Amino acid sequence: YSSNLLHRKILHPPPQTDFSYPQTMSIGATMRATSPNHMEDVELGSSSSANKSGTARTRPMMKLKDSNIVELQPLVEPSSKASKGDGESSSFAKSVIASTMYSGCSIGMVLVNKSLASSYNHLIDGDLNILLVVFQAVTAVICVEFSKFMGWVEYPNFNTRTARLWAPVNLFFCGMLFTGMASMQHNSVPMVTVFKNITNIMTTIGDCILYGASIELLVMAAFGIMLLGAIFAARNDADVTQTGLCWMLANCLCTSGYVLYLKYATKTVKLSKFGMVFYNNVLCSCFLLPVTMFNGELSMFLNTSALHTVDYAVKNWFAGFVGFFLNF
């Protein structure tokens, strides 16, 4: 009621009111007036203070620009500190979740590939390392095509010219997958982890030599800590054979070559990360499937009924799906 009364007095002052002298009305507000035709500043939610001349001092919060329009301004400006803090905490939470999921998927894929490469060899005469790569590549193609059909990801349709330009990259990709599967067969998981960290160091050094990148001291310290940690973890399981060492070194070279050549290739071939997944796995299947026909792996799999199990299929599907899912 008091606020309405004050508002009515501001807009429609009674004709008999004398405004010839300064007066202050305090009904949750301060008003200063000098004449019936000249209304001055009004500040809501504060009290006035008088200067030496006895005139009330107020900050302009509500101003009467004309006889009908009143402009209101906010008394308190919103603070951006709270929203900034919420954004930082949300970004940190997303980073932790992404890192945890990536680590979990990577560990799961390594363990599943180790099982596929070594746990079924007693059922066959030889190995199926190349065919396993083909199975997982086909799974990744199915996953990325389904995601495109559902509208979750976007990339251009298959183009022969793009495939030709991308073929050199894919040769490194195929070599990386095949040598990785072979090294899993002949080495323990801790030793594979050690060599994976060596691969990271090789890739960083190659980036410096080929592209002039600079290496920060903290990055080198992080590499050293990871390498020492992997060596310490593998100290009781350092089971390395000559064959396994050769495959592991080949995997290091193929992986570093793939990453470094990919940096060069993406300057001429513009593909999104899911476009790379699509072309890598399509070309990998096209390159390696004929190899499995010539070396007998495909016929060996088809003639070995012990491998036609749900367990074997689920492991291949999981490894292929994780290889696709890591791109998210």
Image (cartoon, helix red, strand yellow):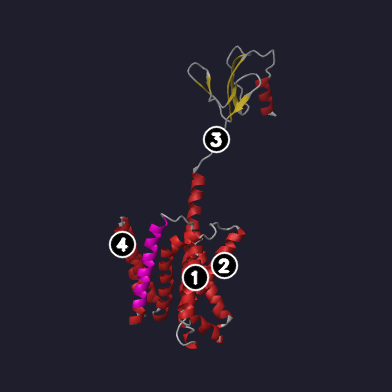
Three-letter residue code for mark 3: Val
Q: Is residue 290 above or below residue 259?
A: below
Q: Give the mark toward the camera: 1 or 3.
A: 1
Let me know if residue 259 is in the magenta part. yes
Q: Earlier in the sequence, mark 2 or mark 1?
A: 2
Name the element at disc 2.
Answer: helix
**Residue drawn 36% across and 70% down?**
252
Mark 3 neighbour density, 10 Å: few (under 14) some (14–19) many (20 or more) = few
Question: Which residue matches tag 2?
Answer: 142
Q: Give the mark toward the camera: 2 or 3.
A: 2
Q: Position of residue 22 (x, y in %)?
A: 57, 16
Three-letter residue code for mark 2: Ile
The CA distance from mark 2 to mark 3 is: 56 Å
Decide: marks 4, 1 in contact (CB < 8 A)? no
Occupied quadrant, residue 15:
top right
Name the element at disc 4.
Answer: helix
Question: Which residue matches tag 3?
Answer: 76
Name the element at disc 1.
Answer: helix
Question: Which residue matches tag 1?
Answer: 286
Q: Give the mark toward the camera: 4 or 3.
A: 4
Three-letter residue code for mark 1: Cys
**Residue drawn 51% across and 67% down?**
282
Question: Which residue matches tag 4?
Answer: 205
The CA distance from mark 1 to mark 3 is: 66 Å
Mark 1 neighbour density, 10 Å: few (under 14) some (14–19) many (20 or more) = some
Q: Position of residue 95 (x, y in %)?
A: 47, 58
Q: Which range is magenta?
A: 246-266
Mark 4 neighbour density, 10 Å: few (under 14) some (14–19) many (20 or more) = some
The CA distance from mark 4 to mark 1 is: 32 Å
